Image (tube, helix red, strand yellow):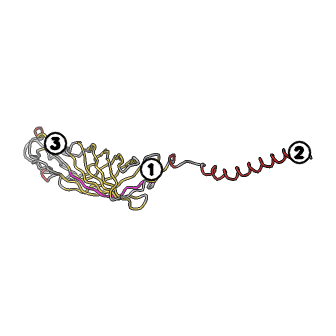
Amino acid sequence: MSRFVRVQLTNAATAFALASVLSVTTAPLAAQVVGRVPEEAVLKDLFDGQRLGVFGGWLTTGLDPVGVRAHSGPIAGVRYTVLMASPLYFSMRLFGVRTEHNVLVPSAPAAARRAGTASGNLLGFDSGFELALTGERAWRGVQPLLTGGVGFITGALNSFDAGGYSPGVSALYSYGLAMRFPTGQNGELRADVGWLVHQMRYPSTFRTEFSGDGAPLRATGTLTPLTSNRAMTLAWTWGIFR
């Protein structure tokens, strides 16, 4: 065998050996890039604990049979949430609504019963649970939640009502949908749309028939009908005790 042929065979063997080594060492690297890198993941862990936040928005009040319910108005408050066990959170909130309501005087003739408006501010508290539809993770930067709770609602800092109506204290039932938008920092944005259901409390004078041309304000039916109100709010929350 000539010297030229031996050199060519030696070079070919060396190239083959080098290619084999490279294929073995690069195979694990190729396997590691299959799928999405963490920065591109659709689902991201949130590592939640306790959060405290403030919120504000608008409360749209529902109808009532007589027409003395509070008008729609701004709502503001504070919220506390804590992760119980994924995907369940426990939540509490305290809120107030600054508004007015119509004053109706039941003893006046039908044409003169409307006596303007009076303050109808509301104060409420509820607590309950929030179910995260994606668990303790955000999907494409959003964590959707279903919310529900119970509490109470009452009048707050209201002036005297010539018609005798007062909101009193009523049980409150709440439910809704929330969307969390984690910022990657300690603070985050949250949007809620929910419903607040509670009883109206009419005074007994709304049932009384006075002399004159006016029938009772509430001749039949319950004096404690239900009313449903819709609240749309935006909140900013912070992680605490981390």
Identify residue type, mark 3.
Asn
Q: Nearer the viewer, residue 67 or 5?
A: 5
Q: CA distance from mark 2 to mark 3?
A: 112 Å
Residue 170, quarter of picture: bottom left
Task: Give the structural element (helix, strand or loop) at label 1.
Answer: strand
Q: Nearer the viewer, residue 88 or 121?
A: 88
The residue carrying pointer 2 sits among few (fewer than 14), some (14 to 19) or many (20 or more) residues within 10 Å by Cα, namely few
Q: Which residue is mark 1?
A: 138
Furthest toward the left, the residue is 211
Q: Which residue is mark 3?
A: 102
Residue 131, quarter of picture: bottom left
Task: Give the structural element (helix, strand or loop) at label 2.
Answer: helix
Q: Is residue 194 left or right of residue 199?
A: right
| Mark nearer the N terminus (1 vs 3) | 3
State the quadrant of the C terminus: bottom left
Q: Which residues are magenta?
A: 123-134
Q: Which residue is mark 2?
A: 3
